[in-house]
Amino acid sequence: MDSAAARERVLDTAAELFYRRGVQSVGMDEIRTASGVSLKRLYQLFPAKEQLVEAYLERRDGQWRGRLAAYVEREEDPVRRVPAVFDWLECWFGEDGFRGCGWINAHGELGATSARVAAQAVAHKRAFRDYLTALVTRAGLPAALAGPLFLLAEGAMVTAGIEQSTRPAAEAREAAELLLATVATTRESPA
């Protein structure tokens, strides 16, 4: 097996185990066994577990944001793309094995002791907020709307992870719709 294939196999295994059970409860030996990659090759690819966690979060970021964007971009109306974010969250929350936000989970476990994990969590959240900012500005809405929408989405993620329910996405979508209606009403009212 070449290095690229071994790397992908290790990352696939780490992604499944880290997300399902938590980063700290999974050792490198378990990843070696589950992936079928020798311990020597594993440590050649990732000399420290922290580097594997960083790579897992980085790869997950691209996958997560790609899935979100693909779903949202199906909506033709730029204004309707905003609530579509919450529709996608509801779908994600309903997936088998959903355990909340991987970056929040990893940051909760290691953020205070791992600058790499903290940086990945910050980068992911910043990219998500930037994505929301781009959505609202493309829709001709005030950029300041992105902050409250971001907090609604993040709160829904945390609550859904704890409650194991899709309901927080629907509630956050309702609040987002109220924000959009308020902005529309404010724009329509005479000055």
Image: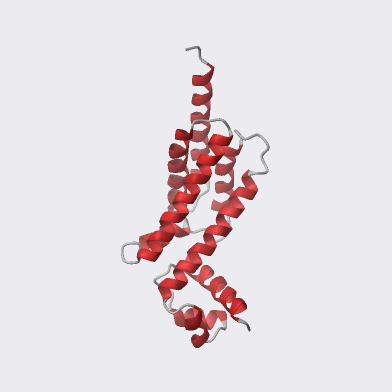
Q: Position of residue 25 (x, y in %)?
A: 41, 73
159 lies left or right of 173? left
Q: Quadrant of the N terminus?
A: bottom right
Pick the front one: 191 or 60:
191
State which quadrant residue 66 falls in. Answer: bottom right
Q: Is residue 20 visible?
A: no
Q: Residue at x 64, y 49 (%)?
A: 70
Q: Residue furthest top?
A: 190
Q: Residue at x 62, y 35 (%)?
A: 78
Q: Position of residue 84 (x, y in %)?
A: 59, 41
State which quadrant residue 11 falls in. Answer: bottom right
Q: Is residue 177 visible?
A: yes
Q: Position of residue 181 (x, y in %)?
A: 53, 26
Q: Residue at x 52, y 58 (%)?
A: 61
Question: Looking at the image, is 25 positioned above or below residue 103?
Answer: below
Question: Looking at the image, is 120 positioned above or below residue 84?
Answer: below
